[in-house]
Image (cartoon, rainbow, N blue to C red):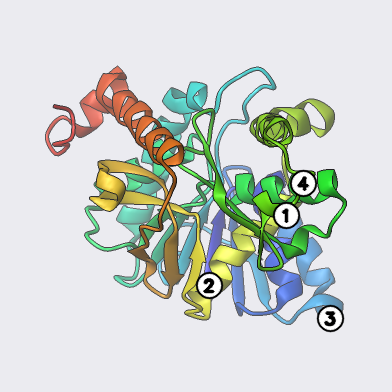
C-alpha cells in the first residue's frame, strides 16, 4: 500500500509519523513545492525506520506518485487565529486546482482514493470530486474527524473520565456551523445525558471550546499537528485495511438527511473504496435542523463565491 502525502509541512509530516509508527502502509512518498524540505523530512523518517517501522520513505514527484493507492493532500495556506477556514477559500482552491492538474497529467490509478485535509476541507473536497468526476466515494475529506476527537477529549477532561471511553460525534461543516450530536453521546455504553454533571451549560461550554480549539492551537503553537496527524492515520488505515469503520468524514451527499450536491460530514462507512456508504442515524430535531443549516451554508458558498461559479458553472446543478 503506497501513500503519497502532498504537503510536507506540520500536518503532512505529523501524519507521516503517525503512519510510520503504526507500520501498516508499506510506502510513503512526501511531495512538496519545497523539494529540499520534503527530502529532509523523508531522510529523517528513514533514519528512524529501524526503530519505528519498515516503510519505504522518499521525497518524490508527481510522476512517481502515479501508482499511489492513497493521496493525502495537506498542502495549503494556514489560517490566522481570527480567520475562518472559509476565508482561505480563494488561495487554497487555486492551489488545489494546480495540484489536481499535476496529478491528472501524471496519471493515477483508477482505484486511488483521495483524502483531502487542507481547508476549507468541505469546499475543497467538493472541488476535487467535481474535477475528477468520480461517481463513487473515492474522494473524501477529513471533515469533522479532528473536531470529533477534540470534542471527546474536552468531554473527558471536563467530567474527569478517560476520553477513550467517550463516544460522541461532531457532524456537518468543519467550521463554525459544526453540529454536536449530544443525543447519542455515551460513556462506555451509558448515555452521557444520564450523568448529572453533564448539564446544558456544560454542553454549551464544551461545544464553544471545541469550535475555538483550532484557533487556540494556532495562537499558541502556530497550527495543529499531532492530533490531526493521528486522525489522518485512522482514516488511511481504515482504507488500507478495508476496516469499514464508521467515521465522520466529509464527502458529497446525494440525499442523506435530505441534503444534496454538497460535501459535509455525516456518519460514513470508510473502507478500501473510500467513503463507501452514508449512514443516516437518528438525530434529535435540533441536531437535524442544525445539520440542514450547515449544508445550506456550504451550498451557498459554492453558489455565491465567484471563483466557484467559474469553476463549476458547466457542471454544478445544485445552485438553484
Mark 1–mark 3 distance (CA, rounded to whole Å): 18 Å
Disc assigned to residue 50 = 3
> Which is nearer the eye, 183 or 32?
183
Q: CA distance from mark 2 to mark 1?
A: 18 Å
Q: Quadrant of residue 264?
A: top left
Q: Is residue 163 left or right of residue 256?
A: right
Q: Earlier in the sequence, mark 1 or mark 3?
A: 1
In the image, which is nearer the foreground, mark 4 or mark 2? 4
Contact? badges 1 and 3 (CB < 8 Å): no
Of the two numbered discs 4 and 2 on the same chain, state the one appearing first in sequence. Answer: 4
Q: Identify the residue shown where x is 68% and y is 36%.
A: 203
User: In this orientation, which residue lies closer to the viewer: 217 or 57?
Assistant: 217
- Residue plotted at (67% across, 29% down): 208
Q: Cα distance, mark 1 to mark 4?
A: 38 Å
| Mark 4, residue position | 196
Look at the numbered disc 1 and give the secondary structure of its residue.
helix
Of the two numbered discs 3 and 4 on the same chain, state the one appearing first in sequence: 3
Quadrant location of the C terminus?
top left
* Secondary structure of residue under mark 3: helix
Mark 2, residues whose alpha carbon is within 10 Å: few (<14), some, or many (≥20)? some
Q: Residue at x 88, y 51 (%)?
A: 160
Between the C-alphas of marks 4 and 2, the distance is 35 Å
Q: Mark 3 or mark 4, which is nearer to you?
A: 4
Task: Name the residue tied to disc 1.
Answer: 14
**Visible residue check, residue 68:** no
Mark 1 vs mark 3: give the one in front. Answer: 1
Q: Nearer the viewer, residue 101 or 244?
A: 244
For disc 2, the marked residue is: 238
Amino acid at each position: 500500500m503506497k501513500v503519497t502525502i502532498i504537503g510536507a509541512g506540520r500536518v503532512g509530516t505529523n501524519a507521516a509519523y503517525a503512519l510510520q509508527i503504526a507500520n501498516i502502509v508499506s510506502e510513503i512518498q512526501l511531495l512538496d513545492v519545497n523539494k529540499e524540505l520534503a527530502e529532509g523530512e523523508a531522510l529523517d523518517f528513514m533514519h528512524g525506520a529501524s526503530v519505528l517501522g519498515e516503510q519505504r520513505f522518499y521525497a518524490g514527484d508527481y510522476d512517481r506518485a502515479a501508482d499511489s493507492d492513497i493521496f493525502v493532500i495537506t498542502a495549503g495556506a494556514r489560517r490566522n487565529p481570527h480567520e475562518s477556514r472559509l476565508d482561505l477559500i480563494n488561495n487554497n482552491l487555486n492551489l488545489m486546482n494546480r495540484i489536481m492538474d499535476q496529478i491528472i497529467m501524471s496519471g493515477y490509478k483508477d482505484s486511488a482514493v483521495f483524502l483531502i485535509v487542507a481547508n476549507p476541507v468541505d469546499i475543497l473536497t467538493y472541488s476535487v470530486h467535481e474535477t475528477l468526476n468520480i461517481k463513487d466515494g473515492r474522494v473524501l475529506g477529513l471533515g469533522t474527524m479532528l473536531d470529533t476527537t477534540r470534542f471527546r477529549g474536552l468531554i473527558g477532561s471536563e467530567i474527569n473520565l478517560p476520553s477513550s471511553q467517550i463516544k460522541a460525534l461532531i457532524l456537518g461543516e468543519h467550521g463554525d456551523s459544526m453540529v454536536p450530536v449530544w443525543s447519542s453521546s455515551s460513556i462506555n455504553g451509558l448515555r452521557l445525558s444520564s450523568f448529572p454533571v453533564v448539564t446544558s451549560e456544560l454542553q454549551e461550554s464544551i461545544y464553544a471550546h471545541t469550535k475555538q480549539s483550532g484557533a487556540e492551537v494556532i495562537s499558541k503553537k502556530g497550527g495543529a499537528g499531532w492530533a490531526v496527524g493521528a486522525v489522518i492515520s485512522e482514516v488511511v488505515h481504515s482504507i488500507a485495511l478495508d476496516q469499514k469503520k464508521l467515521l465522520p468524514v466529509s464527502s458529497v451527499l446525494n440525499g442523506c438527511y435530505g441534503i444534496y450536491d454538497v460535501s459535509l460530514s455525516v456518519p460514513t462507512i470508510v473502507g478500501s473504496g473510500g467513503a463507501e456508504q452514508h449512514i443516516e442515524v437518528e438525530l434529535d430535531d435540533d441536531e437535524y435542523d442544525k445539520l440542514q443549516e450547515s449544508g445550506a451554508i456550504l451550498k451557498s458558498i459554492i453558489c455565491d463565491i465567484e471563483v466557484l461559479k467559474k469553476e463549476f458553472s458547466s457542471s454544478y446543478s445544485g445552485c438553484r
